[in-house]
Image: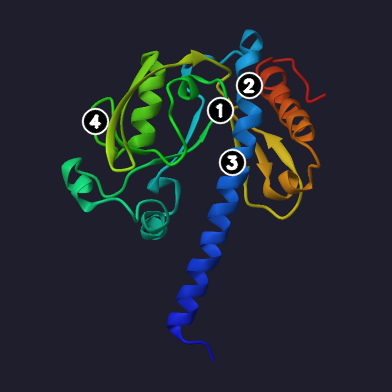
Amino acid sequence: KVSSIDEKEEVFLQKKILINEMIDASKTLHQISWPILKENIDICYNEDSYSLGVLFASEKDLPERDSELFRLLFNKNINPYYLNKYDAVSFPIVISVAKNSPAYKAALTENDVILEINKQNVSNFRKRLKESLARSSVTHFTILRNDKIIKKSIQGIKACNYNVQAIPAPSPNAFADGEKVFVTLAAIKLARTEDELAFLIGHELAHNIYHYNYKKGTEA
């Protein structure tokens, strides 16, 4: 017999393990894919927004029932004073900064806490980020780092606008849908080198660029 408390703790532990695996996988894919997306801008057809070379995690990336889990994992050390001051229930965090990217050159770092974007609160962070990157080359952030508030203005650059993201699946696979590239956790673990993952990502990006954007383009 298992108590409800033990069961709840086990559920929390397994979700925590999966979230951490997804973050590690996302970091790996981000560091490999961002240079590819940047260097192939001349053959992309969807470069209508800017890229900062940074990966965020926010509460709304998880199902609503796991909102508390996000706060426990990523916001537990934040003074409630900041939540009140910036009218937020939680704050997005930086989980990856691509080397030599605009975010890297602006000295953004992993675990930076995003308090504001363009002087607005972060209640609709993903929407506000997307709108900002679509209309302006510069995005302004208010950041909390080691209990200090820092202002950052990051000048974006044009890059292929295809997100490369990990998905939790037990079989090694990758696929494209014309807008994104998906790589399973199993494929990431199976790859022996970063070059193998780069080749896989490049293959799927080619589907997005050539297969989906040409009316007569075939899968081959």
Pointer 3: residues within 10 angstroms few (<14), some, or many (20+)? many
Q: CA distance from mark 4 to mark 3?
A: 27 Å
The numbered mark, 1 or 2, whose residue comes first in the sequence reads 2
Q: Which residue is mark 1?
A: 98
Q: Residue at x 42, y 56 (%)?
A: 73
* Residue type, numbered disc 1: Ala
Q: Residue at x 74, y 45 (%)?
A: 187
Question: What number is the disc on residue 28?
Answer: none
Extreme residue in the top direction:
42
Question: What number is the disc on residue 26?
Answer: 3
Q: CA distance from mark 1 to mark 2?
A: 8 Å
Pointer 4: residues within 10 angstroms few (<14), some, or many (20+)? some
Q: Position of residue 71 (x, y in %)?
A: 36, 55
Q: Which residue is mark 2?
A: 35
The numbered mark, 4 or 1, whose residue comes first in the sequence reads 1
Instruction: Give the position of the C terminus as an image quadrant.
Output: top right
Task: Report if the CB atoms under discs 1 and 2 are less than 8 Å apart.
Answer: yes
Is 219 left or right of 22, judged from the image as shown? right
Secondary structure category for the residue under label 1: loop
The numbered mark, 4 or 3, whose residue comes first in the sequence reads 3
Is 30 left or right of 82, judged from the image as shown? right
Q: CA distance from mark 4 to mark 2?
A: 30 Å
The answer to whether residue 175 of the structure is visible from this angle is yes
Q: CA distance from mark 3 to mark 1?
A: 12 Å
Question: What number is the disc on residue 120?
Answer: 4
Q: Quadrant of residue 86?
A: top left
